[in-house]
Amino acid sequence: MSLLIKAAALALAGAVLGLLLRRDAPELALALSVAISLLAAGLAVELCGELKQVAELAREQTGLSPAVVGPVLKCVGVGIVTRLAADLCKDAGQGAIASAVELCGAACAMVTAMPLIKSLLLMISELT
């Protein structure tokens, strides 16, 4: 909870500073936005260790293969990075680039999920 409060305070301070900078130096406002985003993401990385432990525990308890759990976690990471990058592009007024980033993120998520799709197809073929 304290991590969220830190991230929210950082984001609010960055947003206010960004509004002040946007009038006179929009390029600095964008740089500030990127820096604040990276700092907030850095705060979230602290939680990744705990999330990985819980995912590993869930995998052990359910007997799922690492080949199943890994792609799911990777897809979540792809989604987070894609969202941040696309939002930063939108903030810079580059909607087309944001759309391209989102398309690339969707393609990466699909490729990352391929082992799951292959496993599903194998299970279906074994049932028939």
Image: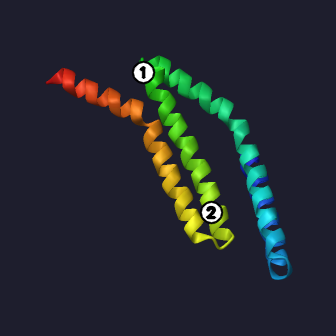
**Image coords of residue 105 (percent x, y):** 52, 50
Colour scheme in use: rainbow
Q: Is residue 109 left or right of residue 38?
A: left
Name the outermost residue toward the bottom: 23
Q: Name the residue beneath numbered marker 1.
A: 64
Does 19 sit above or below residue 70? Answer: below
Mark 1 residue type: Leu
Mark 2 residue type: Asp
Q: Is residue 105 left or right of residue 63?
A: right
- Pick the residue in front: 128 or 49: 128
Determine whether the residue tagged by mark 1 lies in a helix, strand or loop.
loop
Determine whether the residue tagged by mark 2 lies in a helix, strand or loop.
helix
Which residue sits at x=54%, y=21%? 57
Q: Name the residue beneath numbered marker 2.
A: 87
* Residue 124 falls in image quadrant: top left
Which residue sits at x=42%, y=21%? 64
The span from disc 1 to disc 2 (Cα, nearest Å) is 34 Å
- Pick the residue in front: 7 or 66: 66
Does 63 sit above or below residue 68? Answer: above
**Image coords of residue 55 (percent x, y):** 54, 28
